[in-house]
Image (cartoon, rainbow, N blue to C red):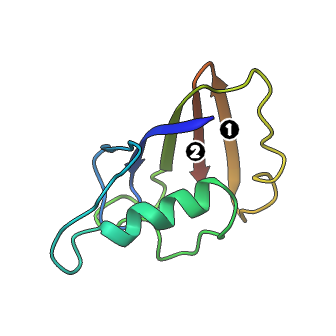
């Protein structure tokens, strides 16, 4: 399984859906507070390494706006375990799986 790209919406500085393509070598370059670390933080949330907190929703979004982190993969096996993701979040969690695509939608 290889991550192809990640799309982030309503997470920190990313209010509108923003897609970052991932290749064998991906470099994120930008000014301070441009959102470079937010991409890695979103991936940590997606893979269950970090919990969301109340400050993760972008300030410009409505309080009930969903945080969406979408990862698309190549060479994805037919079985995909998401059990590690469930129970990581305080709010409602919906995970939709499609061939080559896993979407983590969090409603807090």
**Position in image of residue 34 (x %, y %):** 21, 70
Q: Is residue 14 above or below residue 76?
A: below
Q: Is 8 situated left or right of 2 in this image?
A: left
Q: Position of residue 8 (x, y in %)?
A: 40, 49
Q: Secondary structure at mark 2?
A: strand
Residue at 49 percent across and 60 percent down: it is 42
Asked whether 101 or 61 is in front, the reply is: 101
Name the residue at 49% across, 50% down. 66
Q: Quadrant of the C terminus?
A: bottom right
Q: In this rendering, would 78 be left or right of 98?
A: right
Residue 104 position by quadrant:
top right
Q: Secondary structure at mark 1?
A: strand
> What is the CA distance from the residue labelled 1 to the residue labelled 2?
6 Å
Residue 95's label in the rendered image is 1
The quarter of the picture where the N terminus appears is top right
Residue 57, numbered circle: none
Count of marks placed on residues: 2
Residue at x 47%, y 70% (from the top left corner): 56
Q: Is residue 89 above or below residue 46?
A: below
The crowding category of the residue bearing disc 1, from other C-alpha atoms within 10 Å (few below 14, some 14 to 19, many at least 20), is some
Q: Residue furthest bottom?
A: 32
Is disc 1 in contact with disc 2, using a CB cutoff of under 8 Å?
Answer: yes
Q: Position of residue 87 (x, y in %)?
A: 82, 58
Query: For the residue carrying disc 2, how many other residues have a C-alpha within 10 Å: few (<14), some (14-19), or many (20+)?
Result: some
Mark 1 vs mark 2: which is more N-terminal? Answer: 1
Q: Which residue is mark 2?
A: 105
Residue 108 visible in the snapshot: no
């Amino acid at each position: 399984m290889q991550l192809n790209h990640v799309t982030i919406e309503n997470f920190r500085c990313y209010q509108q859906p923003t897609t970052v393509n991932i290749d064998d070598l991906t470099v994120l370059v930008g000014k301070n507070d441009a959102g470079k670390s937010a991409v890695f933080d979103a991936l940590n949330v997606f893979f269950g390494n970090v919990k969301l907190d109340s400050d993760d929703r972008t300030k410009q979004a409505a309080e009930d706006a969903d945080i969406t982190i979408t990862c698309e993969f190549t060479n994805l096996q037919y079985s995909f375990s998401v059990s590690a993701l469930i129970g990581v979040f305080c709010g409602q969690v919906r995970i939709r799986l499609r061939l080559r695509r896993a979407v983590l939608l969090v409603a807090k």
